[in-house]
Image (cartoon, helix red, strand yellow):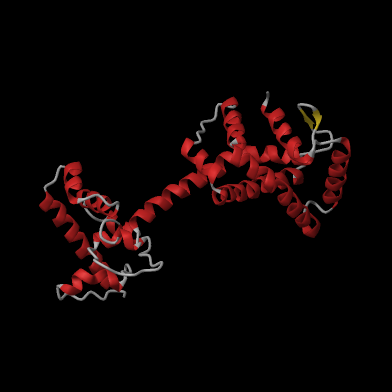
Amino acid sequence: MGMDAEILETIDAVLGGGGTARIEQDAARIEELACGGFEGLAYEVFEIELYREAEPILLGMLRKGTLARLALKQCKSRGWKFFVHEDDMRLLRGSRRERDIIMVDVLAEAMRKFRRDLQNGRGWTADHKGPRGACSLMTYFIGQCVWVFRRAYVRWAQERVDWARLHAVYDFTEDAANEAGIGGLLQSTSYEMDSEVLGTDFEDILDEQAPETQAVVRLTVMGFPDTEIAERLNLTHVTVRQRRSRFRTVLYQAARERRIWIPEELHTKAVSRGHQQRGAV
């Protein structure tokens, strides 16, 4: 079965087919919108209606993996490089929130393309031919969503990777206080935090350090014990502790210079040593 035919079958299952009456209604609506140049309040209302009708279709296609599969088939037929990780497919099947995120991005981009094509005299018309003859406007629009899925997926996947990296660095949960995150790095023994974060300046400061120090710090905030850090980097335990201690000093200095904000609760060790670090606290 061709890709277009599979799209059509998916839409038919939801809408009950794209019969002649529906296509005629779609054609009359597009002709009406064309009089206003596909702009203004009338087109905004049309977009809202299009969004509401397409939303459950796309969410179903994301949950079943149909949207990703059609996009992969489309890219392969054109020689484009594209890959959807199996973990991401499982996440989209199980998480309504993640499906919503991609769905919103896909709809937004597809609508921009759809409107641009209409304004340029291209896009859907009543005589647009699908694998079974003329197709409805919705069938055509879902096809546009398949076209833009690749870019939406790549953005979504990259944002998840970035979030995971930052979350590992800025982990302020109580369970991670002594083993991972900034609490472990600064050797804070106990504190109660809600949602404080250091900000992205942490990465800037870390990037200024020697590669060996960067490696020690990154493994520390990921929760690796000193013994494993030493083995991974072929360092002695003393060197690991020294590198981490020097970076803590750099962080507190950055706090005094207001380059970074460190919660006061995370100054426990410094305060206990009589070196009260106020910085930007």
Q: Is residue 239 left or right of residue 26?
A: left
The answer to whether residue 140 is above or below residue 97 is above
Q: What residue is drawn where x is 30% and y is 58%?
A: 181
Q: Residue at x 70, y 33 (%)?
A: 7
221 on left or right of 49: left
Q: Residue at x 18, y 51 (%)?
A: 226
Residue 257 in sight from this viewpoint: no
Task: Give x and y (percent) for residue 275.
Answer: 17, 74
Measured along the vertical axis of the image, is residue 154 above or below residue 97?
above
Which residue appears farthest toward the top when viewing the image?
1
Counting from the top left corner in percent of width and height, residue 52 is at: 72, 51
The quadrant the C terminus occupies is: bottom left
Based on the displayed image, in which of its 4 quarters is residue 2 positioned? top right
Residue 269 lies left or right of residue 264; in this view the side is left
The image quarter containing residue 249 is bottom left
Residue 42 in percent (x, y) is at: 81, 57
Against 262, residue 14 (above or below) is above
- Total labels drawn: 0
Task: Tell me if residue 75 can be seen.
Answer: yes
- 149 on left or right of 163: right
Choose between 47 and 254: the one closer to the eye. 47
Image quarter of residue 221: bottom left
Q: Quadrant of the N terminus?
A: top right
Horizontal and vertical percent for residue 225? 21, 50
